[in-house]
Image (cartoon, rainbow, N blue to C red):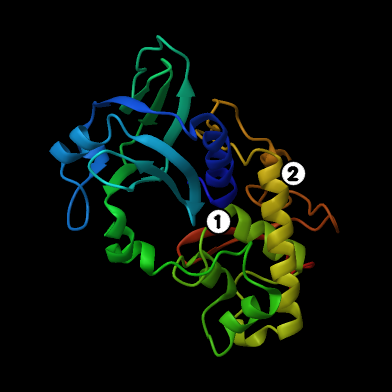
């Protein structure tokens, strides 16, 4: 699943390509890809309101990508996309026909298109009026952003918590945007075992973990994210950070620091790779 660096990379690319663009048409090729329910636009309202809207900006929160639109019917509309396992948002040149697995197409007045494609159909788009975000329980329950919280604030999150450190990092209500890849990579760099309980880790080591987490995320964003299978950025380019993985996906191979074979376990139901010598 694309994590913070991948979604941030897509958001930055789309911000360059879409800001101030006008949407002239919408093609909903897979109705199930539009999330409907309390606080969202109906399918009919979505198809009526989005055409003619102008893109005010593109941003990210946690693993969600958000397009802010101005439309005739609403001063502000939000389109939230969650890519889940295999979702893609890509800009396409004029005249490009929808490819297999394209679920939603936004046509722009300059002839370009924004495609939302998803092989496994787990991803979704959610359209909301201005007050929609405040009433979206998923949105309001998200934890702080790791690139915005201070080291002291980060360490404070763990105080009195008896959960395992990696499980807390993966909990989106605890801290937002972190998934399996960047949890494993930051814990390795910080020298903390993923199955360590939070109360057993000193405040100094938690602050070090924050520093390493921020470093890993920034490096991954600079590398265009990590492409394991399906992820590409808004222009269809794969990421490169997978070439710098130190532990993720390397179980049984030699630790890059000490040459000890990397161990594999399970934390919070997720496969976890760590060095039994470097991480204590």
Asked if residue 244 lies left or right of residue 172, the reply is right
Q: In which quarter of the image is residue 47?
A: top left
**SS label for mark 1:** helix
Q: Mark 1 points at which residue?
A: 180
The residue that disc 2 covers is 244
Residue plotted at (63% across, 79% down): 153
Crowd rating for badge 2 (residues with CA inside 10 Å; few <14, some 14–19, many 20+): few
SS assignment at label 2? helix
Foreground residue among 47 and 105: 47
Asked if the residues shown at circle 1 and circle 2 are in contact, with their CB atoms under 8 angstroms apart, the answer is no
Q: How far apart are marks 1 and 2 (CA)?
A: 15 Å
Q: Residue at x 27, y 29 (%)?
A: 51
* Quadrant containing the C terminus in the rendered view: bottom right
Residue 198 x %, y %: 60, 82
Could you tell me residue 67's position as x and y percent?
41, 43
Residue pushed farthest top? 95
Between 110 and 160, the residue placed more toward the observer is 110
Q: Which of 67 and 158 is in front in this view?
A: 67
């Amino acid at each position: 699943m694309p994590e913070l660096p991948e979604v941030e990379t897509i958001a930055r690319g789309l911000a360059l390509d879409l800001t101030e663009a006008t949407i002239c048409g919408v093609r909903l090729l897979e109705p199930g890809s539009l999330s409907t329910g309390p606080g969202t636009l109906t399918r009919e309202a979505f198809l009526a309101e989005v055409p003619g809207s102008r893109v005010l900006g593109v941003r990210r929160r946690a693993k969600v990508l958000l397009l802010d639109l101005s439309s005739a019917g609403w001063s502000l509309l939000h389109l939230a996309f969650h890519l889940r396992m295999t979702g893609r948002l890509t800009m396409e040149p004029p005249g490009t026909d929808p490819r297999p697995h394209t679920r939603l197409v936004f046509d722009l007045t300059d002839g370009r298109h924004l495609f939302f494609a998803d092989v496994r159909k787990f991803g979704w788009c959610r359209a909301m009026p201005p007050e929609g975000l405040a009433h979206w329980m998923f949105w309001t329950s998200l934890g702080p952003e790791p690139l915005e919280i201070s080291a002291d604030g980060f360490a404070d999150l763990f105080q009195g918590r008896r959960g395992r450190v990696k499980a807390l990092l993966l909990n989106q209500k605890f801290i937002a945007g972190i998934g399996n890849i960047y949890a494993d990579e930051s814990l390795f760099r910080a020298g903390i075992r993923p199955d360590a309980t939070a109360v057993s880790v000193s405040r100094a080591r938690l602050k070090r973990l924050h520093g390493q987490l921020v470093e890993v995320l920034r490096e991954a964003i600079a590398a265009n994210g990590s492409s394991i299978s399906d992820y590409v950025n808004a222009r269809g380019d794969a990421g490169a950070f997978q070439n710098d993985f130190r532990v993720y996906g390397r179980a049984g191979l030699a630790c890059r620091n000490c040459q000890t074979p990397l161990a594999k376990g399970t934390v919070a139901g997720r496969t976890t790779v760590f060095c039994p010598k470097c991480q204590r």
